[in-house]
């Protein structure tokens, strides 16, 4: 018996969340809810908008409340950009793989930010050890996003990358640096390193994947193919 891997439209996750962000700001303006408004906007965009229109915040709210179309346009411009909320996408990405993997005796636990980091001298240390040993973040690489245990042991680096710009441009460089670190320090460990990258930057993805094909400890894949890897290599 085997299960069917779960597919999610990772690109659409970000699109849908952006629509939600816009609606939250729209409603906050309609209801004069400053707390919700301030929690869900890009403050720099708001500042620029007020400067460009020569309006105070109170006057902007009044204009928006008098015209729902203006409110929609303003909300769209100043709401938080969903591409800055990648951790929410990656939580779904990891959870989908975790749900599938547990049927095969493989446990995937999402980690809090900075829970475990690789150090540049080849160790993996906890947040507590980082503090107690007084190790600078400059001496570490990107923290892991999930831990694998059960039938196999290992770590997950998870990213959803669509389009370019901002932090997204650094994702493949971060992944490459971590793969180099694995090649240098971790090949003798009984663990795997899964680079869970869902992206439309296919050329960058294939270059990274092909670069490390020879290393069996490194798996560069997406959320759907990783489930198929589990299905093909481990008994239900």
Image (spheres, rainbow, N blue to C red):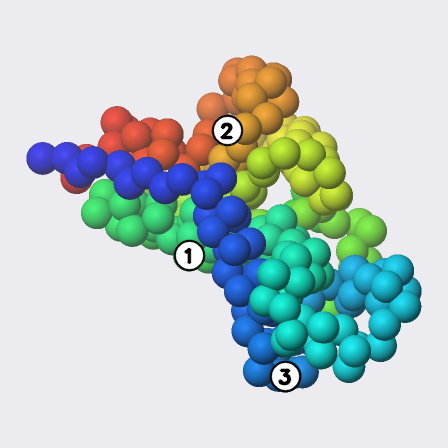
Reading the image, the residue beneath label 1 is 109
Query: Distance of mark 1 from mark 2, alpha carbons?
Result: 19 Å
User: Residue at 75% across / 43% down in the picture?
Assistant: 166
In this view, the residue in front, 181 or 59, is 59
Q: Tell me: 78 left or right of 31.
A: right
In this view, the residue in front, 191 or 48, is 48
Q: Is residue 61 above or below residue 150?
A: below
In this view, the residue in front, 133 or 29, is 29
Find numbered disc 3 in the image and state the secondary structure of the residue it sits on. loop
User: Residue at 36% across / 34% down in the picture?
Assistant: 224
Quarter the C terminus occupies: top left
Q: Visible in this render: residue 65?
A: yes
Find numbered disc 1 in the image and state the secondary structure of the residue it sits on. strand
User: Residue at 59% across / 67% down in the picture?
Assistant: 68
Mark 1–mark 3 CB contact (< 8 Å): no
Reading the image, the residue beneath label 3 is 32
Reading the image, the residue beneath label 2 is 220
Expressed as whole percent of the image width and height from the top left, the position of residue 121 reads 74, 43
Q: Tell me: 57 left or right of 158.
A: right
Query: Distance of mark 1 from mark 3, alpha carbons?
Result: 40 Å
Quarter the N terminus occupies: top left
Q: Is residue 79 above or below residue 92?
A: below
Task: State the residue lying farthest toward the front.
Answer: 66
Expressed as whole percent of the image width and height from the top left, the position of residue 172 reads 66, 32
């Amino acid at each position: 018996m085997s299960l069917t891997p779960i597919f999610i439209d990772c690109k659409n996750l970000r699109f849908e969340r952006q629509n939600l962000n816009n609606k939250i700001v729209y409603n906050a303006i309609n209801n004069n809810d400053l707390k919700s408004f301030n929690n869900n906007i890009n403050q720099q965009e708001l500042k620029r908008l007020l400067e460009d229109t020569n309006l105070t915040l109170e006057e902007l709210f009044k204009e928006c409340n008098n015209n729902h179309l203006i409110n929609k346009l303003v909300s769209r411009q100043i709401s938080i950009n969903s591409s800055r909320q990648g951790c929410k996408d990656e939580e779904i990405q990891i959870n989908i793989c975790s749900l599938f993997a547990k049927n095969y005796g493989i446990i995937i636990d999402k980690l809090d930010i900075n829970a475990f980091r690789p150090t540049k001298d080849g160790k993996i240390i906890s947040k507590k050890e980082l503090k107690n040993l007084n190790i600078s973040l400059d001496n570490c690489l990107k923290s892991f996003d999930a831990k694998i245990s059960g039938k196999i042991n290992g770590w997950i680096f998870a990213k959803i990358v669509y389009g370019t710009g901002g932090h997204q441009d650094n994702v493949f460089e971060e992944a490459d640096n971590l793969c180099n670190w694995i090649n240098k320090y971790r090949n003798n460990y009984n663990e795997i390193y899964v680079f869970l990258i869902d992206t439309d930057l296919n050329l960058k993805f294939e270059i990274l994947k092909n670069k490390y094909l020879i290393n069996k400890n490194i798996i560069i894949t997406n959320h759907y193919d990783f489930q198929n890897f589990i299905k093909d290599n481990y008994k239900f």
